[in-house]
């Protein structure tokens, strides 16, 4: 009986299943939420004095240009890519080839158009634009050093650029992706318009207004070439505004009130705690700084001429404790800083070399060097702020544990760097410039006469190794050489002593999605940022 | 006769100082302030005996510990004992204050007396220089000088002294101008006393009450300025404790470890308040209208 009934009204029993199936067809899947639209506000703590990318290296200029312009090669961003890790991504070049000898780079220019602003007025991007930009940079741009190995740049046709080098340069792609290497139209160099005040690029947004002290405003570039991984047109956000809020407390208040969506600039952990209390759904995005503190030991001061003494000082330092207590996060320093996670030595090895203090061994090394009772020295500390000074005080006590007395002398950073260049110090503690490539660490610290070679290092073996890695085209082989150099520096140079790379905080409001801060200026992940509704 | 006068003079001065002190002790506010200052002074002077810990040594197993029986005022962010640091910081503050007062009294007093006694073009030149220094607020001037010289206790003393000298010069000058027209000064001149002798024998004793009042106020100002300079990073260099530096560093942990700013702040407030109250009481005691 029951079976008959079920057979007769079988369609009734199927109704719930049908309803569910219908709902699945009609209702949009949760993942397909419309990402386009809305406005994002960012704070940049300075006004742009002008918009000429060849005139200055100021972050206030280049962070703003990044929204409207592109480079030939861009930095890839994503959850799986570290803050300082360079992964080349096609920019205005959709592809490139490198000759076997590493001396010829051939770039194919993508089909892209300039923004519809006179006199360029939306024409297609050509190889001539790239050549004109690079020629102007070589002739007098602030970033001309990045093209120092270039022998010639030619455009065999409208869509091809060929760069030939004087000698192999494995960091050429990274140099072309450098934060200052924006490509401009030829009109920017033949008097067509004034690049100090007019911004014409190919980027995701068009700069529509800039009022000093008020805001820089952008609207979506409908003709931008960028697409997301699903082929959706980028950027997602219709409008972007950059607010030049110079005062830290005003920036904090602007973020707390929701006026600012994405934080840019310095922020310490204490201030972050305050923000978290005021904005409970804040996104606490943390990365490791692309700078690190370094302790320079001048061999002109007798004890520091001894490698044993420098090794002893390295063994005295409790860097892991310093990082935890003073900085509350970040990464242990290395010859190549930890932000360059693909090039620095693996963390376990850096901890073994620099993060394992051994005071007994350190004292034995001092005794071996002829200083069994220790010694005193003037410890020049550049005043980069309270947390940095705390690092110096931490080091001072570590050294006292092995009988070495460091007399702290505070000094202004500019004066300190001048002293460094003159070699007028015994030991100097400073914050290194931000670097994005291992080669920059090597060439600035260890080559004779280099800008950061404050201790006069002139080691022919090391110089040869540095020059050799510059010519290795094979990525894996070059990686091995980069590690070999770092180990050589640890064994034979021990100067400067790398200390710690601080944690960087990049908070964003809770409804911001797709925000991946990156070492380079210009907010490269911003075109993929969207607002959850 | 002359020898009798010479012997009697120091005795009169001692009696006067004693009388001022007694009057100060009889004044309830003055007496309380004196007691407080004496306690602060004793704590600072005997800091090595009172403090349980070395103010520079970091105990890395006791980071940001709240006040306890072991660490009376807690520990800071790298494990240093805050009580010991407050005591040694007070020592630095009082040293700066004392040195500034002494140097300012001597230099400012001398310049003020010369300006007021001689008058004329000497006065004009000195007063224009003083006015030029007075144009800038004293803290800004101190900040400028300290930033130029670099952070050290010695440089803080120089910076604060230079900023406070104009204050002394002006007051002493006006007092000297009042005194120089008295008959006893004219009499001294007539009997052939040199200007230096007149200033030392008649000027200084008569100016002393005013200078004492001003000195007590400048003492407080010097302590505050030292704290402000250290707060701004151009004062006492690390790792040496200073009340200003402690306050500056403590602000980072104001929610997490309020003891880092409460105790240095209290010590600073108490010291400056005591000095100001003594100054007020001294002024009352020395004011002829109150006698």
Image (tube, helix red, strand yellow):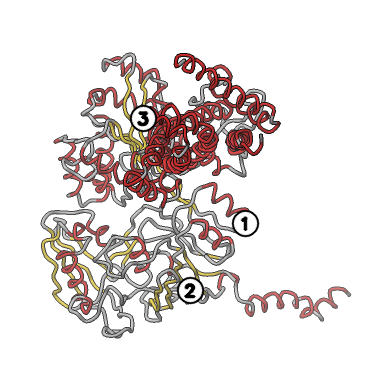
Query: Residue A456 versus residue A178: which sits nearer the camera?
Result: A456
Q: Residue at x 17, y 49 (%)?
A: A471
Badge 1 and badge 3 in a common chain: no
* Disc 1: host chain: A
* Disc 3: host chain: B
Q: Which quadrant is home to the C terminus of chain A?
A: bottom right
Badge 2: residue crowd in 10 Å (few <14, some 14–19, many ≥20): many
From the top left corner, tell me how far across and down residue A166 is, in percent.
Answer: 10, 57
Q: Name the residue under label 2.
A: A237
Badge 2 and badge 3 in a common chain: no
* Disc 2: host chain: A
Q: In this view, does A346 lie to the left or right of A96?
A: right
Cα distance between the residues tagged 2 and 3? 81 Å
Q: Earlier in the sequence, mark 2 or mark 1?
A: 2
Q: In the rendered view, would you say A249 is above or below B223?
A: below
Q: What secondary structure is marked by label 2? A: loop
Query: Residue A51 versus residue A119: which sits nearer the camera?
Result: A51
Q: Name the residue under label 1.
A: A278
Cα distance between the residues tagged 1 and 3? 67 Å
From the top left corner, tell me how far across and down residue B163 is, in percent.
Answer: 42, 42
Give the image quarter of residue A480: top left
Residue A331 showing in the rendered view: no
Cα distance between the residues tagged 2 and 1? 26 Å
Give the image quarter of residue A183: bottom left
Residue A215 showing in the rendered view: yes
Q: Mark 3 points at which residue?
A: B196
From the top left corner, tell me how far across and down residue A261 is, in percent.
Answer: 52, 65
């Amino acid at each position: 009986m029951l079976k008959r009934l079920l057979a007769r009204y079988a369609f009734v029993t199927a109704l719930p299943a049908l309803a569910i199936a219908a709902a699945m067809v009609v209702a949009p899947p949760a993942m397909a939420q419309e990402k386009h639209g809305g406005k994002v506000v960012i704070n940049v703590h300075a006004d742009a004095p002008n918009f000429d990318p060849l005139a200055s290296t100021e972050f206030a200029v280049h962070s703003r240009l990044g929204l409207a312009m592109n480079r030939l090669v861009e930095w890839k961003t994503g959850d799986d890519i570290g803050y300082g890790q360079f992964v080349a991504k096609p920019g205005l070049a959709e592809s490139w080839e490198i000759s076997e000898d590493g001396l010829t780079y051939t770039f194919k220019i993508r089909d892209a158009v300039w923004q519809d602003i006179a006199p360029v007025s939306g024409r297609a991007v050509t190889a001539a634009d790239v050549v004109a930009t690079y020629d102007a940079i070589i002739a007098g741009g602030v970033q001309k050093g990045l093209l120092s190995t270039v022998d010639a740049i030619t455009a065999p046709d409208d869509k091809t650029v060929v760069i030939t080098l004087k000698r192999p340069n494995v960091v050429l792609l990274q140099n072309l992706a450098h934060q200052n290497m924006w490509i401009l139209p030829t009109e920017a160099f033949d008097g067509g318009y004034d690049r100090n005040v007019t911004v014409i690029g190919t980027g995701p947004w068009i700069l529509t207004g800039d009022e000093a002290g008020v805001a820089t405003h952008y609207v979506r570039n409908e003709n931008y070439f960028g697409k997301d991984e699903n082929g959706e047109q980028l950027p997602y956000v219709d409008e972007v505004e950059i607010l030049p809020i110079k005062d830290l407390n005003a920036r904090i208040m602007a973020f707390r009130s929701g006026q600012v969506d994405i934080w840019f600039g310095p922020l310490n952990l204490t201030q972050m705690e305050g923000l978290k209390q005021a904005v409970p759904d804040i996104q606490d995005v943390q990365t490791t700084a692309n700078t690190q503190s370094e302790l320079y030991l001048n061999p002109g001061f007798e004890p520091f001429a001894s490698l044993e003494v420098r090794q002893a000082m390295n063994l005295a330092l409790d860097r892991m404790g310093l990082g935890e207590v003073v900085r509350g996060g970040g990464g242990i320093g290395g010859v190549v800083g930890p932000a360059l996670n693909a090039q620095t030595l693996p963390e376990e090895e850096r901890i073994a070399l620099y993060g394992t203090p051994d005071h007994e061994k350190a004292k034995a090394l001092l005794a071996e060097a002829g200083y069994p009772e220790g010694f005193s020295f003037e410890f020049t500390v550049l005043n980069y702020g309270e947390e940095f000074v705390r690092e110096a005080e931490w080091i001072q006590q570590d050294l006292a544990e092995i009988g070495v007395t460091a007399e702290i002398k505070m000094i202004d950073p500019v004066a300190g760097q001048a002293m460094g260049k003159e070699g007028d110090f015994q030991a100097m503690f400073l914050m290194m410039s931000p670097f994005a490539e291992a080669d920059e660490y090597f060439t600035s610290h260890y080559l004779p006469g280099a800008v950061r070679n404050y201790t006069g290092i002139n080691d022919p073996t090391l110089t040869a190794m540095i020059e050799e890695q510059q010519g290795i085209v094979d990525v894996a082989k070059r990686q091995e050489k980069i590690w070999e150099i770092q180990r050589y520096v640890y064994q034979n140079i021990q100067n400067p002593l790398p200390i710690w790379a601080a944690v960087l905080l990049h908070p964003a409001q809770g409804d911001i999605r797709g925000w991946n801060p990156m070492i380079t200026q210009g907010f490269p992940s911003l075109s993929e940022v969207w607002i959850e509704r | 006769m002359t020898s009798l006068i010479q012997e009697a003079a120091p005795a009169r001065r001692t009696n006067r100082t004693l009388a001022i002190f007694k009057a100060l002790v009889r004044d309830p506010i003055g007496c309380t302030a004196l007691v407080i200052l004496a306690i602060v002074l004793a704590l600072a002077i005997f800091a090595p005996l009172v403090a349980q810990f070395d103010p520079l040594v970091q105990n890395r197993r006791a980071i940001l510990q709240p006040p306890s029986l072991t660490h009376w005022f807690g520990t800071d962010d790298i494990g240093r004992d805050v009580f010991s640091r407050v005591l040694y910081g007070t020592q630095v503050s009082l040293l700066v204050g004392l040195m500034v007062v002494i140097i300012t009294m001597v230099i400012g007093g001398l310049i003020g007396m010369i300006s007021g006694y001689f008058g004329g073009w000497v006065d004009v030149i000195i007063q224009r220089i003083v006015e030029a220094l007075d144009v800038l607020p004293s803290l800004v001037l101190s900040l400028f000088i300290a930033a130029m010289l670099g952070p050290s206790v010695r440089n803080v003393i120089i910076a604060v002294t230079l900023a406070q000298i104009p204050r002394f010069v002006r007051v002493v000058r006006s007092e000297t101008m009042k005194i120089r027209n008295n008959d006893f000064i004219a009499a001294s001149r007539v009997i052939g006393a040199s200007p230096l002798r007149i200033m030392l024998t008649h000027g200084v004793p008569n100016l002393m009450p005013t200078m004492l009042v001003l000195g007590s106020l400048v003492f407080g100002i010097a302590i505050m300025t030292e704290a402000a300079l250290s707060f701004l990073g151009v004062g006492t260099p690390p790792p040496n404790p200073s009340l200003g530096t402690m306050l500056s560093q403590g602000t980072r942990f104001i929610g997490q470890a309020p003891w880092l700013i409460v105790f240095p702040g209290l010590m600073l407030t108490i010291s400056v308040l005591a000095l100001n109250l003594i100054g007020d009481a001294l002024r009352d005691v020395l004011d002829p209208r109150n006698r």
